[in-house]
């Protein structure tokens, strides 16, 4: 398969973004090429090749040459940008600062999660038992959905009209007459591909039943269950997926605790007009 040179350069540039602050190349690294006095180390080249994914020996050898040429092109374009003083443009300076912060954040998170243990069998079993709708009682649903752009004040009116309408088509006609925008479609999805608010409604619905589900903001979804089919998943079938979910939840909890600690010890001062609004109803 042929890869356009410019497209490959862009791909390598994207892969290199996560390593935008490369350490200085040392002699022991080995030099793959130099561009205007700047060295491209063998380590940098191998890391860029590794980010392309799993390759066999032949593919890796071919990719190495293409990646090296793309890195050379990248250096040339970067030099040209600096000669044009683009590295001093405010928007470029800001973007470079943001990219550097993101690299540091990812490195910090990697270190934070490094020693986290994989979920125990008991944790996986507990998650499986707490979510029968996703596993033991899993279903595939055929749903007709009508997504509306609707002011919150009109939700009750829409729900009342929905109950009065004999069919979803009749309800859609009423919406058009009211000037309420919406889009409709039919989808067949397993439980795990359905958002939690929608699934919570669907698992208790009968075929043909219609319900209104708020989606947040001014978005409301009108769902009609057209049918469902049981397709349960055993614990062993779900073990790997559950492990990833449980690990993700543990990482999220750990990260939230770490950020809370950093906020408590950090010196944060908001400029006038930028302070967050006080949260009500929370301890």
Image (cartoon, rainbow, N blue to C red):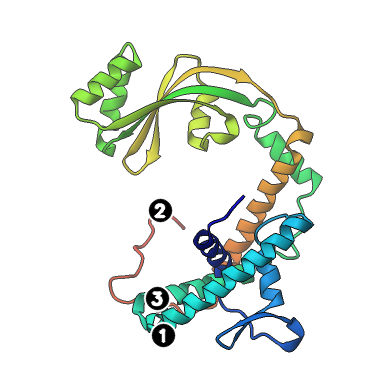
* Residue labelled with disc 1: 83
Task: Classify mark 1: helix, strand or loop.
Answer: helix
Task: Classify mark 3: helix, strand or loop.
Answer: helix
**Nearer to us in this view, 146 or 162:** 146
* Front position among marks 3 and 1: 1
* Residue labelled with disc 3: 92
Q: Position of residue 268 (x, y in %)?
A: 44, 77
CA–CA distance in space, label 1 to label 2: 55 Å
The circle drawn on residue 135 is: none
Q: Residue at x 79, y 35 (%)?
A: 236
* Front position among marks 1 and 2: 1
Label 3: how many residues lie within 10 Å, few (<14), some (14-19) or many (20+)?
few
**Which label's residue is closer to the chain start, 2 or 3?**
3
Q: Is residue 73 left or right of residue 121?
A: left
- Hey, which residue is sitting farthest front in the picture? 2
Q: Position of residue 15 (x, y in %)?
A: 58, 64
Q: Is residue 269 left or right of residue 68?
A: left
* Residue labelled with disc 2: 281
Query: In which quarter of the view is residue 8 placed?
Result: bottom right
**Nearer to us in this view, 141 or 115:** 141
**Nearer to us in this view, 21 or 206:** 21
**Nearer to us in this view, 258 or 194:** 194
Q: Residue at x 64, y 82 (%)?
A: 23
CA–CA distance in space, label 2 to label 3: 42 Å
């Amino acid at each position: 398969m042929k890869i356009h040179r410019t497209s490959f350069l862009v791909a390598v540039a994207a892969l290199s973004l996560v390593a935008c602050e490369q350490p200085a190349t040392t002699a022991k690294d080995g030099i793959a090429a130099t561009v205007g006095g700047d060295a491209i180390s063998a380590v940098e080249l191998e890391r860029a090749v590794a980010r392309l994914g799993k390759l066999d020996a032949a593919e890796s050898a071919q990719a190495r040459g293409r990646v090296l040429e793309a890195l050379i092109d990248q250096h040339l374009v970067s030099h040209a940008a600096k000669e044009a003083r683009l590295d001093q443009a405010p928007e470029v300076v800001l973007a470079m600062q943001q990219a550097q912060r993101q690299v540091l954040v990812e490195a910090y998170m990697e270190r934070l999660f490094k020693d986290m243990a994989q979920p125990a069998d008991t944790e996986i079993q507990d998650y499986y038992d707490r979510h029968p709708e996703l596993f033991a009682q899993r279903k595939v649903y055929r749903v007709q959905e009508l997504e509306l752009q609707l002011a919150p004040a009109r939700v009750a009116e829409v729900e009342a009209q929905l109950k009065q309408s004999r069919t979803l088509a009749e309800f859609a006609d009423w919406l058009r007459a009211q000037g309420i925008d919406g889009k409709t479609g039919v989808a067949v999805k397993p439980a795990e591909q359905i958002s939690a608010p929608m699934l919570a409604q669907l698992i208790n619905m009968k075929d043909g039943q219609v319900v209104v589900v708020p989606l947040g903001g001014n978005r409301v979804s009108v769902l009609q269950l057209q049918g469902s089919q049981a397709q349960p998943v055993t614990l062993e079938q779900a073990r790997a997926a559950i492990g990833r979910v449980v690990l993700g939840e543990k990482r999220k909890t750990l990260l939230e605790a770490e950020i809370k600690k950093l906020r408590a010890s950090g010196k944060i001062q908001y400029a006038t007009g930028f302070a967050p609004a006080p949260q009500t109803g929370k301890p």
